[in-house]
Image (cartoon, rainbow, N blue to C red):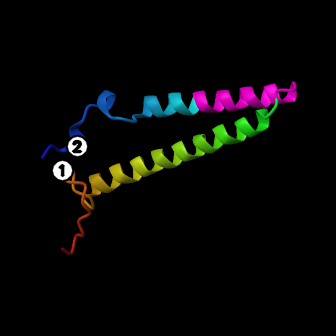
Amino acid sequence: MTDIMNIPTEQFPLNWHRYNHLMDELRDAARGFAWLDERGWPGGKDLDKRLMAIWSDLHGVWETIQETERAMRSGTISKTDGKRHHPSA
């Protein structure tokens, strides 16, 4: 199997650049709908809230990616099969 820690950053499905871009776009869209709501757009605050929920979920995904990478570097998850390995095993 391939050592997945050797995947080039630009080929990783959600790298730092993509994550930041998506977070910025979601936040800007949410703010835009909040602004529209203040000007009478029906449901603007609801769209703002829903977009920010997606923003929050994406942040959780990013945290999981970071935790997984830390575990892989520490050796508690295999770099080739994704299975957890316990030092005592």
Q: Are marks 1 and 2 in contact (CB under 8 Å)?
A: yes
Q: Is residue 27 left or right of residue 45?
A: left
Which amino acid type is marked by label 2? Ile
For image coordinates 59% across by 40% down, the residue present is 55
Measured in 3D between alpha carbons, the distance from the residue under mark 1 to the one under mark 2, in whole angstroms, is: 6 Å
For image coordinates 71% across by 36% down, the residue present is 47
For image coordinates 24% across by 35% down, the residue present is 7
Q: Nearer the viewer, residue 79 or 42?
A: 42
Query: Looking at the picture, how far across and down is residue 84, in whole percent?
Result: 26, 63
For image coordinates 28% across by 53% down, the residue present is 72
Q: Is residue 73 magenta?
A: no
Q: Residue 41 sits in which quadrant?
A: top right
The secondary element bearing badge 2 is classed as helix
What residue would you read off at disc 2? 4
Q: Which mark is residue 88?
A: none
Which amino acid type is marked by label 1? Thr
Q: Is residue 36 magenta?
A: yes
Q: Residue 5 sits in which quadrant?
A: top left
Query: Looking at the picture, how far across and down is residue 40, in whole percent?
Result: 87, 26
Query: Looking at the picture, how far across and down is residue 81, in whole percent?
Result: 20, 54
Crowdedness of circle 1 by 10 Å Cα count: few (<14), some, many (20+)?
Answer: few
Q: Work out whether 79 lies above or below 26.
A: below
Prevalent SS, magenta region: helix
Query: Looking at the picture, how far across and down is residue 82, in whole percent?
Result: 25, 55
Q: Which mark is residue 80?
A: 1
Residue numbers of the magenta segment: 25-41
Q: Is residue 51 left or right of residue 74?
A: right
Q: Work out whether 50 lies above or below 38.
A: below
